[in-house]
Image (tube, rainbow, N blue to C red):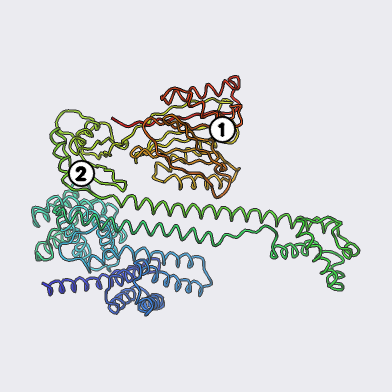
Amino acid sequence: MYNLIRTKLRNNIILVYIIGFVIARASFLGISPLAIGYFAAAYFEKASTGLLFVTILLGIGTVMPPTMVLKYLLTLVSSIVVFESPILKKKELPARVYFYIPSVILGVFAMMEAAAYGWNIDLIIMAVLEALIAYVSGVIFSQGTGFLIKQPKGTKMTNEEMISLSIMVAVIIYATPEFGSPYIAPIETVVYFIILLFTYKYGVGQGAVTGAVAGFALTLRGEPVHVVSMLTLMGIIPALFRSLGRIPTATIFSLIAFILGLIYEDMTVSVREIGAICSAILVFVLLPKSIIYRVDYDNDEPGNVLLSAENVKKLANARMKIFSDSFLKLSKILDSITDRQSKTGRKELDDIFEDLSERLCKNCDNCSFCWDVHFEETYKSACQLFEVAEKKGYIDKKDIPSYLMENCICTDELVLEANRGFEIARLNNIWANRLAESREVIAGQLRQISDVIHSLTGDIYKAARVMEKEEDKVVRKLKIKHIDVKNIAIFEKADKHKEIIINAALGRNRFITTKEVASLISDALGTKFVVSQASKSMLSKKYEEYIFVEDTKFKLLTGMARAMKDNISGDNFSVLRLENGEVMLALSDGMGTGKEAGDESETVLALLEQLLEAGFDSEIAVRLINSNLVLKADRQTFSTLDMATVNLYTGVCELVKIGAASTFIKRDGWVETISCSTLPIGMFKTVDYDSVNKKLYEGDIIIMVTDGVLDCFPEENKEAYMEKLIMDINSNNPQEIANRILEHALSQKNYIPIDDMTIITAGIWRKN
């Protein structure tokens, strides 16, 4: 058995070298980057360095002149030297390094070639393009070469391996030299055979992809465009008959070609193509079963499926970590290049001095008198003048040293030009500092995005699939109601709450709501489930995906009351129910009143809703909103933000306050006040906020107000006055509490609002 595996691998490796020789012949626009890409891919898969070097170089040499081959020879040699160096040999290099190094080296030699021709812009662009193609092709080819070298007989191809092998086939078709006669078509024979082989062996997906890319390759060789659609169909339809065996599959394959020729005149099959199809079918039928066999995709054992899912989870987790680290590194780079300056530097002073000399002194009649005969006195006086200008930022005529006043005939122009130069330098500093500040803000955003990716990755991949017995219970329960479940998965998320994803359809002529389905699932598992907001309300007769989540322990009822000073309120509020079982209450008060203030607060809440719905936590959402407001170039925008996020599973409320008025929690017999001392959001590049968690109990009421409400009260201690007012309201109805607070506040100002006033109330109760 071991010897058979070794023989199989040896044959596959020989095939890798043959493919390398042909792909190396694929040159275009006078370049051959695909050869370098294939070399990197095969080297990464541990192919023999010597044989790989020889075959790639021979392939390039058959299509390019010796002077052009030299560039690729140097690239291959340099790459091997780098890869085989003791320093890199001892390290476990990331996969991408194997594709970066040859591509960069090729780009360097291509740039040297461009330099030899006087830095021709076309050659420079071609050098960059060649390096990029080498890198991309290396990444693509690595999937196909890895499958050929490593995978044992009968292994299924992934989508990436499928596409990679198909592209390799297309390149081989393109690079194969034209030979034959009007009645012999060796290239077409190979194309038909490969499509038939892949269709029978791997099914409709690989057949369709191979047919499409092979047709595209033939069009590059001069064939009409309709060849692409013809070969694609010849790769799709025969796959439906592969379970019947080789001969029926081959028969359908040939019939498709002839039927298309009868229906469409442009696709008529010539005698030459008939010979190619017959030759391909003959080879296909006569080859031994060790080569021509089906790889079935529908016989997965449950254990293998779960193991594969775990591997995909680990791989995706690793990739997400790479993304997170990349954003973090990028933010550090931006931080490192940020450089602010508060006053004019030495370089700017030298530039001003040089510009002043060029504009004023060069064309002056006394130039030689000042800068030749009395150079030392003139230079000393000019330095004194610039020292004054550097301290003050400008100069007056009285600041001119006495020597220049006595000898310079252009003192008025000197003051004017010097001040003009310092004003330009000052403006440059302002914009440079603004750019530096923007870099700092963007660096902060990138750090926050890195944190988000890292935290979201943890949330997603901590979810564990629960025992399949529970899935069977659900399937059996739904089957009683004639609901056909095609696929089901029950996951336990990081917070220990379950989520069910089913792909189901309704049988027979009847109707059922997803709410009823949730009730059936609850009965089966003994835990209350509800329909996710992302799912439809009615079950369809077609297979569709539905999501059910574990029901929360608490419910939240809200109320709202508001009054406006102008026609448009500067306050805005939001009540948002999130998929994770939380409810977010938010108030934002834009600075001032009217439309402008309303636009500011609306922007804050719109961004907040989008970020929270996307899965960002409140801290990162606040920081991203702040950086977005700081970066607005037209004007500074800032608003208060008062946010309460209630977890309906646990009853814990997170309060985040930025420049906002106090929040009140009415409990059983007393009122708790939560205040803050921070500035509004959007004022500075780093935002400071107050955050506190409070446990809520049955019947507790959250009361959030804008400052316009508290400002109506005459007492100095407005929070204490508000606490007494809330205690005097003998009601647990959130809407009634909001109405009575607003009524009392307006009554203190003769029912004329002195500012925009908004009140949000929310009461929490345990579900039955």
Question: Which quarter of the picture shows residue 731?
Answer: top left
Secondary element type, mark 1: helix
Residue at image position (11%, 62%) is 282
Question: Gap in Å between the C-alphas at discs 1 and 2?
Answer: 51 Å
The mark nearer the N terminus, 1 or 2, is 2
Residue at image position (19%, 54%) is 305
Secondary element type, mark 2: strand
**Which residue in the protein does label 2 denote?**
488
Quarter containing the N terminus: bottom left
Question: Which quarter of the picture shows residue 211?
Answer: bottom left
Give the camera-side residue of 348 and 331: 331
Residue 459 drawn above or below residue 549: below
Residue at image position (34%, 32%) is 555
**Which residue in the protein does label 1 denote?**
707
Q: Residues within 10 Å of mark 1 (few under 14, many from 20)?
A: some
Q: Which amino acid is tagged 1?
A: Asp
Q: Are marks 1 and 2 in contact (CB under 8 Å)?
A: no
* Whole-percent x, y for residue 478 in the image: 16, 36
* Whole-percent x, y for residue 159 in the image: 25, 56
